[in-house]
Amino acid sequence: MGFLKRNFGCGSIFYFIFMVGVVASELQLLTAPSVEAKCGDNLTLKCEVNSMGLTDLTFTTFEWMHKTSCKDIRLANTGHGLYCQIQNKTLLFGTLTNIMPDDKGEYICKIRSNYGSVYNKTNVTVNCCIGSSEITGNRSHLTCQFKGVYPTANILWFQKKADMNW
């Protein structure tokens, strides 16, 4: 009986050391949960690898994804899009240039490594897109037109203080 107790105790110690080793060597990606930008601005998303205890980490893919993906920045600069750059093998910057309403949404940073695949998300919100407005007509009939405005808004008409929205 003493022999069984001793073996069980050694097994428990081994299990404890194994579990501590698993917890200490975890691969994570750190991103901001959400970011906000104005139309026309540039925005840089940051994704940082946290590889506590993983000294031999190698990766095959490290990318930001939205509607398309980007890898290392070796793309021609078209003036609009998502361009990525890896720094020190632990940081991935995804730069959105000339942000437009279509750029809003969920961006995923993903890494595929010798320890498996991990991802994290950032939600991008786009505000303050003011395009152009045009008012045409005469004293009895006016038309107001907006182009390139985001987010969409309701147009309300007033004459002096009277609401003309019937």
Image (cartoon, rainbow, N blue to C red):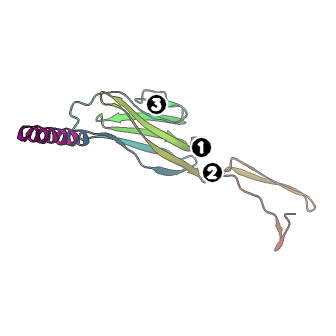
Residue plotted at (10% across, 42% down):
5
Residue shown at 81% from the left, 64% from the top = 157
For marks 3 and 1, the one nearer the N-term is 3
Q: How far is mark 1 from mark 2, CA to CA?
A: 8 Å
| Label 2 – label 3 distance at C-alpha | 25 Å
Q: Position of residue 31 (x, y in %)?
A: 40, 45
The kind of secondary structure element at disc 3 is strand
Tell me the residue that label 1 is attached to. 100
Quadrant containing the N terminus in the rendered view: top left
Q: Secondary structure at mark 1?
A: loop
Residue 114 in the image: above or below residue 14:
above
Name the residue that disc number 2 marks.
129
Residue lying at the far bottom in this picture: please name it.
Answer: 161
The residue shown at (46%, 27%) is: 75
What amino acid is at disc 1?
Answer: Met
Circles 1 and 2, Cβ within 8 Å, touching? The answer is yes
Disc 3 packing (10 Å; few <14; some 14–19; many ≥20): many
